Amino acid sequence: MRRVLLPHHFSPQPAPAGAAIDDFSGLSMGTSWSVRVVGGGAALQEGLQRQLDLVVAQMSHWYEDSCLARFNRAPAGSWHTLPLEFFTVLSFAMQVARASAGAYDPGAGAMVNRWGFGPTRRCDEDGFVAPRPDEVAALLTHARRHGIELDSVARRARQPGGVLLDLSAVAKGYAVDCLARHLEARGLHHYLVEVGGELRGAGLKPDGQPWWVALERPADVADGPAEMALALHGLAVATSGDYRRFFHSGARRYSHTIDPRSGAPIANELASVTVLHAECMAADAWSTVLTVLGVEDGLALAERQGLAARFLRRGADGALTEHLSSHLRSMLDE
């Protein structure tokens, strides 16, 4: 039986009568993107792609000439004036780091890279070897001694020396928000935008229906709770899962989600965490944080932050068990 999630508030504004849905798509950030918009016209493709290209140029750790890559190479003690978009994302990331008591750290790029999930020396390449305990300890010691400082007035950030920013847990969600704002600025208020599986929707389709999407779940598990369908109306959704990027070493499976408090991949039996939020950047970041924290601590933080979150945990028998925050449970149409 399919279960339905409904937002608490619906806009009464209908889609333009008789309008068509226009579709746009492309590639960016190592993945695909798509936009469905009511009455958009044919001239949107270039502008939408430009929004994503800007995020890549500023925040990608895969390109040596990005603003982020240049900051990562900067000398110790140097201050850098950042573009508005980059500073906005970094500021939010640091707010989430503080609110999560370190379960997320935008400066944990060195840990991510050493575990083989960065742009070089990847875990899927021949010759990769997982870090030794003493290497992990050294990375943790450096992270605890060296933190990034922000100057909000001058929009500057200080490189303390050797800190590698990795905004992967925030930038893709921010890119989704950029696409949505680009449409809104052009008077287009009925749309569904997606980048790499993260989505944001607003308004209605011409037939009066909302944009229905299924909450993501691992494809490798047959047993578990019934599917959830979400009316993506004034909401964004992001999912963090252990089934996207991982490697095996011996009998253990290592997920790409790194706990910056331990310096190692998570080991808490979580298969995925989905977060619903008004902004995709927030949904993206919080889904990562809650994944790191695990079910018990993650649910507690979701309640304190008022987050609509679904946790799927792998059982010993391979089946999934579901845990819902009260805010998400209140959206169930039962």
Image: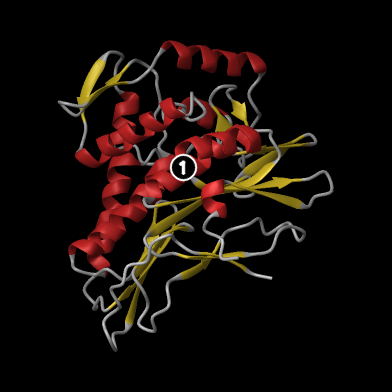
Q: Residue at x 32, y 53 (%)?
A: 177
Q: Secondary structure at mark 1?
A: loop
User: Foreground: 326 or 137?
Assistant: 326
Furthest toward the right, the residue is 317
User: Foreground: 206 or 78?
Assistant: 206
Q: Using residue 277 as the reference point, say whether residue 44 is left or right of it.
A: left
Above or below residue 175? Residue 87 is above
Above or below residue 289? Residue 158 is above
Q: Which residue is mark 1?
A: 306
> x, y (%) of residue 105?
45, 28
Furthest toward the bottom, the residue is 18
Task: State which quadrant residue 70 falls in.
Answer: top left
* Mark 1 neighbour class, 10 Å CA radius: few under 14, some 14 to 19, many 20 or more: some
Q: Using residue 306 as the reference point, say whether residue 299 is left or right of it.
A: right
Task: State which quadrant residue 71 falls in.
Answer: top left
What is the three-letter code of the residue carrying label 1? Gly
Task: State which quadrant residue 99 falls in.
Answer: top left
Q: Is residue 127 visible?
A: no
> x, y (%) of residue 286?
47, 41
> x, y (%) of residue 300?
57, 34
Q: Residue at x 46, y 57 (%)?
A: 196
> x, y (%) of residue 205?
37, 78
Above or below residue 295? Residue 3 is below
